[in-house]
Amino acid sequence: MSIEQIYMYILLLAGAVTILYVFFGDVAEGIGEGIPFINPTVLMAFVTFVSATGYVLEVSTIWSSWIVLLASLAVGVVLDILLYFFILLPMSSAEVSMAYTDESLAGLVGKVITPIPSDGYGEIVIETVGGLINKRAVGYDNEEIGYGKEVLVIEVEKGTFLVREYEPFVFNKK
């Protein structure tokens, strides 16, 4: 078996493991918490970089196999470090999320899009970073709230938003 075939088989194996990791990665997620370079993503990327670089160098140069291996390891280390510090680390510390819970919307101001009758349901829309969210609403004290009025979400009970007409606080200028 030639060295090019070995590099190609390792590359194919790394690709297969990467696909399996995409599907079953939650099982191995805690492995890399303490030591970042034991992270499965970083290790698979390193093996992929080394085998791909080794294959390309073996096929396209006349260097000896030892020089190709050393060059491949160097390229793999550099690319792995760049991947970790410029892609994986910033992504792991990112806090932006499109997810929300109904309870996290309490205290926000929304707008009535379907009038809320006394002792009945209406609909409000709340504008967030992730877009517009429509929710079922009732008056907090069973009061009637008309179309287009701004409302303050007081609390959430079983998916229904209890709202009050919003009265912005105005500072008196003296």
Image: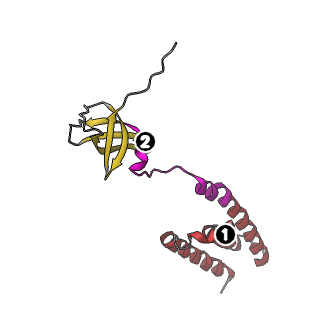
Above or below 173: residue 164:
below
Location of residue 9 by image quarter? bottom right
Above or below 138: residue 24:
below
**What residue would you read off at disc 2?**
128
Q: Which residue is rendered at x = 59% and y = 74% of the image?
A: 14
Q: Position of residue 17 (x, y in %)?
A: 55, 75
For the magenta stretch, what is the residue range? 83-109
Q: Residue furthest front?
A: 141
Q: Was residue 99 drawn as part of the magenta stretch in this picture?
A: yes
Residue 62 in sight from this viewpoint: no
Q: Position of residue 92 (x, y in %)?
A: 59, 57
Amino acid at pointer 2: Thr
Q: Residue furthest top?
A: 174
Q: Which residue is rendered at x = 20% and y = 41% of the image?
A: 119
Camera-side residue of 70 and 87: 87
Q: Position of residue 24 (x, y in %)?
A: 49, 73
Q: Earlier in the sequence, mark 2 or mark 1?
A: 1
Above or below 76: residue 138:
above
**What residue would you read off at disc 1?**
46
Quarter the N terminus occupies: bottom right
Q: Was residue 145 drawn as part of the magenta stretch in this picture?
A: no
Residue 165 in sight from this viewpoint: yes
Camera-side residue of 30 and 138: 138
Q: Which residue is rendered at x = 21% and y = 37% of the image?
A: 118
Left or right: residue 171 versus residue 164 is right
Mark 2 → mark 1, Cα distance in angstroms: 40 Å
| Mark 1: few/some/many CA within 10 Å (<14, 14-19, 20+) | many
The tag on residue 139 is none
